[in-house]
Amino acid sequence: MILLDTQIWVWWVSRPERLQPRHRELLELGADRVFGVSIISCWEVAKLVEYGRLKLDRRVGLWIESALAEPGVSLLHLHPHIVVESTQLPQPFHRDPADQLLVATARILQCPMMTEDSKIATYPHVRLA
């Protein structure tokens, strides 16, 4: 499984041309792969829409429902181990709670994470896809 960060997930579903070619290729050729989407990403998408920072082609609830129904997508829930890990990440790491939870999810599930966020991509304590 590869954990998708929120930005990757949104771009894959709604704006694939914005993805880096290597990420687009992994997502398009990954028919036999599972792509994990954290419940935190669902919350983040809804908050971005609420704040007017993200415009979708349909209501946010419908967008999330259809985006989670994409082939190969698996919804990942938060578990106590992930929540605790997010508060104990090796430092330094930035203070964005959503990013902390996403990185903790990748670390606990021992899976690579696909991101274009430089703050995560340069963090040496998470594997990248």
Image: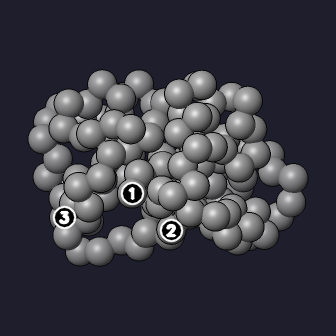
- Front residue of 87/10: it is 10
Q: Which residue is mark 3?
A: 84
Give the side of residue 96 with respect to residue 70, left or right. Answer: left
Residue at the image position 14 percent from the left and 52 percent from the top = 88
- Front residue of 54/73: it is 73
Q: Which mark is residue 52?
A: none
Q: Are marks 2 and 1 in contact (CB under 8 Å)?
A: yes
Residue at the image position 67 percent from the left and 41 percent from the top = 11
Tag 2, which secondary structure?
Answer: strand
Residue at the image position 63 percent from the left and 43 percent from the top = 28
Tell me the amino acid under the disc marked 3: Val
Q: In this rendering, does residue 64 appear at all?
A: no
Tell me the amino acid under the disc marked 2: Ser
Q: Which residue is mark 1?
A: 1
Mark 1 or mark 3: whose residue is earlier in sequence: 1
Q: Which residue is mark 2?
A: 74
